[in-house]
Image (cartoon, helix red, strand yellow):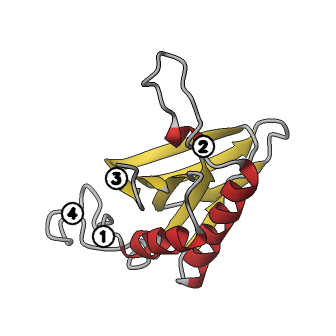
């Protein structure tokens, strides 16, 4: 299971077919979630716990030096932030065989959705405010990055 985590000032996901907002947050983390065929709900729990505690947030803004020079000392919960989670099977694209990506490593939709939903539920259980995209839908994503800060987390990476 792979996460691409970006610190944001705000983020919003629109479902293209309907034009409706699926999820929206202010200050916090925008997270793309990729699920492999071998991934389990336990993998989702481990990464949810890691993400909830990930210290990539700062209290201060560019004009506020109160947080020791805006160091990344705090979790999203510490700063009363939110997380917007979007499923992204293309995180397991393989281009080793040419220029057209293969998605053979990505989980099939039933497994991917179950692991993704479990990941979201675990974050909520941990007390994190969570918004989501719409699984399996074509979405438009609007983010205002903060930093920028981008971190990749992975559980049981393939060797």
Tell which residue pokes out farthest to the right in this image: 18
Q: Which residue is labeled 3 in the image? A: 151
Q: Residue at x 51, y 41 (%)?
A: 92
Pointer 2 local density, CA inside 10 Å: few below 14, some 14–19, many at least 20? many
Pointer 4 local density, CA inside 10 Å: few below 14, some 14–19, many at least 20? some
Provide residue 104's location: percent of width, then percent of height.
Answer: 59, 37
Q: Which residue is labeled 4 in the image? A: 70
Q: Earlier in the sequence, mark 1 or mark 3?
A: 1
Is 88 on the left or on the right of 30, as rendered?
right
Are discs 4 and 2 less than 8 Å apart at CB?
no
Is 66 on the left or on the right of 39, as rendered?
left
Calculate the distance from the C-alpha at mark 2 to the C-alpha at mark 3: 18 Å
Residue 138 is drawn in which quadrant? top right
Instruction: Tell me the mark number nearer the camera, choosing from 2 and 3.
Output: 2
Tell which residue pokes out farthest to the left in this image: 68
Instruction: Tell me the mark number nearer the camera, choosing from 1 and 3.
Output: 3
Secondary structure under badge 3? strand
Instruction: Tell me the mark number nearer the camera, choosing from 1 and 2.
Output: 2
Q: Earlier in the sequence, mark 4 or mark 3?
A: 4
Calculate the distance from the C-alpha at mark 1 to the C-alpha at mark 4: 12 Å
Q: Does the rendering let one see residue 135?
A: no
Q: Does the rendering let one see residue 76?
A: yes
Secondary structure under badge 1? loop
Are discs 1 and 3 less than 8 Å apart at CB?
no
Residue 132 or 154: which is nearer the viewer? Answer: 154
Q: Which residue is labeled 1 in the image? A: 55
Task: Answer above or below: position of 82 versus 91.
Answer: below
Q: Which residue is labeled 2 in the image? A: 89
């Amino acid at each position: 299971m792979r996460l691409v985590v970006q610190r944001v000032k705000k983020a919003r996901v629109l479902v293209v077919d309907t034009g409706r907002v699926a999820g929206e947050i202010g200050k916090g983390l925008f997270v793309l979630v990729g699920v492999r065929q071998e991934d389990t709900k336990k993998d989702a729990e481990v990464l949810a716990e890691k993400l909830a505690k990930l210290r990539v947030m700062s209290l201060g803004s560019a004009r506020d030096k109160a947080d020791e020079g805006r160091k990344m000392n705090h979790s999203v919960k510490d700063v009363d932030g939110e997380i917007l989670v979007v499923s992204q099977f293309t995180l397991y694209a393989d281009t080793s065989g040419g220029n057209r990506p293969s998605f053979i490593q990505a989980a099939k939709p039933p497994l991917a959705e179950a692991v993704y939903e479990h990941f979201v539920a675990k974050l909520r259980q941990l007390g994190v405010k969570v918004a989501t995209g719409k699984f399996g839908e074509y979405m438009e994503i609007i983010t205002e990055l903060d930093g920028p800060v981008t971190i990749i987390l992975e559980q049981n990476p393939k060797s």
